[in-house]
Each structure stands twice: as structure tokens, then as C-alpha cells.
Amino acid sequence: MNSLIDALRRHSPPILAVLGFIAAWQVVVTLLDVPTWLLPSPVTIWRTFLKNAHMLGRHVLATGSGAVGGLVIGALAGIALAIVMARSRLLERILMPLLVIDQSIPKMALAPIFVIWFGAGMMSRIFIAMIISFFPMIVNTVRGMRSIDPRLADLMETLSAGHWSTMTKVRLPNAVPYIFSGLKVAVPLAIIGAVVAEFMQADSGLGYVVLIAVGNIDTPLVFVAVLLMAALSLALFGLVSMAEALILRRRFAYLALADEPRA
């Protein structure tokens, strides 16, 4: 019961802020009689969502599948490369500028090339989502592996532990919070990557819905698609946060046991 009350207290300010913003939006649009094509009211957007709910499900699934697929592949590849870079400073100095250059190139400019290579289907979504979520995973994982307590490194060296033992028993466990931080950054980027691919050429997905709605000057449907993108990103972010809480709670469970009073 106390945990429920604490959760309500923790989440009530942002919820109230969002509800207040929606109410103010509705009042302003109604009082100023703003045209629907310029700025639809929240009520109009909700009605549009209900009207098109039967066909929006497959588009949400298409965008979500591409984003999750790219996120998983990008995260695994990023962690694998980070392990290699954490072992070799020289390799890190060689690869990091190349990764920064890759990250600085607008993915919208590269999207047509990827569509030509992989077609207009799921592979383009996954690939763009992967390369756009790849960088934060590498940066955070390398930082986590490098920020270990020097005493632990000295202890492993004293025990004549090999590189792999040090990596699996010290560096990787220390990088877990950093990996989850990278995932939290990569989640919205993966959604953006999937939508960018859909903007180029697709027959499904929320980006495709936006293009169709803009062509028909259906502004409420554009807002519906954009809000569904935000909801999808929040849902994935929430899943990552839940996984982080569960894993870190198990990891540090021994501290809670150590603090319990002995009989």
C-alpha cells in the first residue's frame, strides 16, 4: 500500500501537468476557433484515433517491430564492439572518430541509399534503427567498463586473472548501469530511425501514415500518428526501465541483506 502511495506521489506531478496542458489546449482552440487543418483540438484528435483505430494497429506494429529489431541488433553489436575497444586504447582512438562521423551524418540523407540496398520493407527500418542506436550503446558501455574501481583492477591483477575473467567478473558487471543508460537514449533514436525509413518508401508504419495524412491535409491524423510514436517510445522506455530496476535490484540484493538486523 505504501509503495502504491509513493508511486502516485512520484508520478502525479507529470500526469497533472500533461492533463493541464491538454485542457489548456482544448480551451484555447475552442475560444479562438482555430481551424482543424491548422491545429486540431484534443477532442478532435481523440475522435480521429477512434475512427482509424482499426487500421492503426498494424502500422504501430510495423514501426515497433523495426525499431525493436534495430535496437536489439544495435545494442548487441555496440556492446560487442565496446568490449573490443575497452581492451585496446589504440583501437578506441582509431574507431571513435569514425563513429562520431557516422553519427553526425543526417540519417535522412542516408535513408535513400539504405532503401536501395535493402528495399522498402522491414530490413530498411531495422538497419536505420540499428545504426542510429549503435553509437550511444558503444559510448556508454566503454565508459562503464573503464570506470571500474582501480582497487578491483589491482586485485584481479594480483590474482593473476586473465583478461576474459576481468572482463566478465569486473568490467561488464560494472558497465550494466551504463548499458541501461545507453538503451534509454537509444530507444527514441530507434523509433526515429524506423520512421525515417518509412518516410522514404513504405506501405505501412506510422511514418507512412503521416505521409498519407499530410497528402490528404488530414492534420488530426498527423497528430494521432505522432502521438502514437511518442506512446511507443514511452512504452519501450518503460520496459527498459523495468528491466533495469529488476536486474540492478538482484545485483545489489546482497547489500539489502547485509543491512538487515541480525537476531
Image (tube, rainbow, N blue to C red):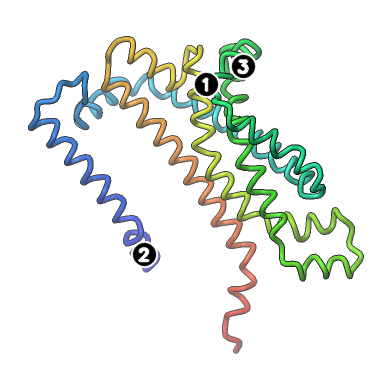
Q: CA distance from mark 2 to mark 1?
A: 43 Å
Q: CA distance from mark 2 to mark 3?
A: 47 Å
Q: Which residue is mark 1?
A: 108
| The one of 202 and 5 positioned closer to us in this rendering | 202
Compared with 131, 114 (above or below) is above
Q: Which quadrant of the view contains residue 34?
A: top left
Q: Which residue is mark 3?
A: 114
In the current view of this chain or complex, which residue is farthest to the left? 31
Q: Which residue is mark 2?
A: 6
For disc 3, the neighbor class at 10 Å (few under 14, some 14 to 19, many from 20) is: some
Q: Amino acid at mark 1?
A: Met
Q: Amino acid at mark 3?
A: Phe
Report the residue at 43% width, 22% height from top. Answer: 206
Q: Earlier in the sequence, mark 2 or mark 3?
A: 2
- Residue 207, given in percent of the width and then of the height, sits at 44, 20
**Which quadrant does the N terminus fall into?**
bottom left
**Which quadrant does the C terminus fall into?**
bottom right
Q: Are marks 1 and 3 in contact (CB under 8 Å)?
A: no
Compared with 129, 215 (above or below) is above
Mark 2 or 3, closer to the camera: 3
Q: Is residue 69 visible?
A: no
Q: Which quadrant of the view contains residue 190?
A: top right
- Residue 28, given in percent of the width and then of the height, sits at 13, 35
Q: Amino acid at mark 2?
A: Asp
| The one of 9 and 155 positioned closer to us in this rendering | 155
Q: CA distance from mark 1 to mark 3?
A: 10 Å
Q: Secondary structure at mark 3?
A: helix
Report the residue at 78% width, 55% height from top. Answer: 168
Report the residue at 30% width, 56% height from top. Answer: 12
- Residue 130, given in percent of the width and then of the height, sits at 62, 30
Mark 2 or 1, closer to the camera: 1
